[in-house]
Amino acid sequence: MNAPHPAHAERSDLYQATSPLHLTPLWEVLHSLVPPRPASPCVPALWRYGEVRPHLMRAGELITAAEAVRRVLILENPALRGQSAVTQSLYAGLQLLLPGEIAPSHRHTQTALRFIVEGRGAYTTVDGERSTMHPGDFIITPSWTWHDHGHPGRSCGDARGQEADEPVVWLDGLDIPLVRFFDAGFAEDGSARSQALSRSEGSSFARYGYNMAPLRGDAPFGATSPIFSYPYERSREALHQLERAEPLDPWDGFKLRYINPLTGASPMPTIQPFLQRLPPAFEGRSSRQTDGAVYSVVEGAGTAYVDAPGGPLRFDFEACDHFVVPSWHALRLQSSGGCVLFSFSDRPVQQSLGIHKEERLA
Ligand code: 1HN
């Protein structure tokens, strides 16, 4: 073996002498600080609903929504265990509410989205307005708004029948890691379990959801959409109409982004949700983006091929499965019978910083 370069021993001495002063030589870390391309510590991962659901239902037997406050199994990126993060910037979890339960009112700086996975009969109340949940609905909780969830079941006297007795499960997406990064989070519990209602159900949609808007008044939630619920019925219809009559995109199939109707921008300043239809016999091309994304399979089945540093991965997915594609991991989608995918990412943050990048590969 060669003798160590004389400077190396002296450099070592320097590092040892500077370390107690909390000083670090940049030249030892420069390349990992500014890598030539994104090198996410996150890994691609798939959560099969068939495997997750029994544990979620078991949680429903072991703890009430009231005791848990939010009864959720967090989707943790396998490479970020213990951090409650699905990507470096985003949180995702599956929440269960059973008939007769209430998840009590609170508010926090973190913005949340809900995407309903299964079940009927539950509602969420945001800032005094209730939204009934249906599978496929995308629902927003703006930053610092009071919110509670409830599931009256059949005890409330209406005759909706069997369906109101179902467990309801939804995907929560929050900007928790982002807000934690900024050390900017506040939270507060409500004084009542359920907040008082101040508007009729559907009034925010009536005001803002039909390509019209009130004549006076500011945006009620700043940069966040004034619509609390984007019903699946309507988003699905949009995609199906495009599928019937329009050419598909070779990478995305038919993919639309949800918007804040007052601005045309993302419904939330930190999270952009999307809905995407892959028609039958779809063989998508490969692309990569700097925004890692979480996917919820709404209908149908297909395959996601994700290029990862350790070799390509293949996720065969079906309805209610969830998967995560980290930043700058090329993704290719395929579906023989057709499917619908919901997804969300931190794209609006990256776009506002001017660093978002997408590459569509051959
Ligand atoms: C929260 O408030 C909800 O309101 C869900 O349903 C998940 C995760 C962390 C912190 C707050 C909800 C959450 C959360």
Image (tube, grey):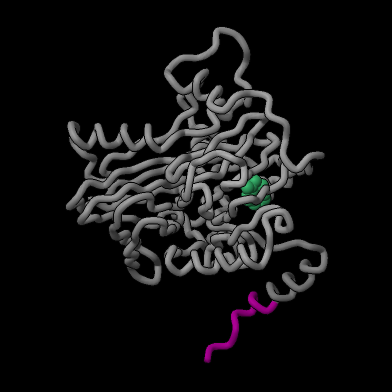
Q: Is residue 25 magenta?
A: no
Q: In front: 30, or 127?
A: 127
Q: Nearer the viewer, residue 149 or 48?
A: 149
Query: What x and y, as percent, mark residue 186?
Result: 76, 42
- Measuring 49% from the left and 66% from the top, which residue is drawn there? 52
Let me know if residue 178 appears in the view.
no
The image shows a total of numbered marks equal to 0
Q: Relative to residue 292, is residue 173 drawn left or right?
A: right
- Depicted 264 relative to depicted 131: above or below: above
> Going 56% across and 37% down the picture, which residue do you hit?
140
* Residue at screen point 48% across, 59% down: 39
Please give left or right for residue 188 compared with residue 357 in the image: right
Res 190 quadrant in image: top right
Name of the residue lying farthest toward the top: 215
Between residues 159 and 168, which one lies in front from this camera angle?
159
Is residue 137 among what the camera can see? yes
| Residue 312, horizontal then vertical, whole percent | 33, 67
Residue 135 versus residue 39 in the image, above or below: above
Which region shows up in magenta? 1-9
- Please state the horizontal and vertical placement of residue 240, each as a whole percent of the image: 26, 36
Which of the two residues, 359 or 124, is positioned nearer the viewer here? 124
Residue 204 spot, x, y in % from top left = 55, 24
User: In the picture, residue 16 is in which quadrant?
Assistant: bottom right
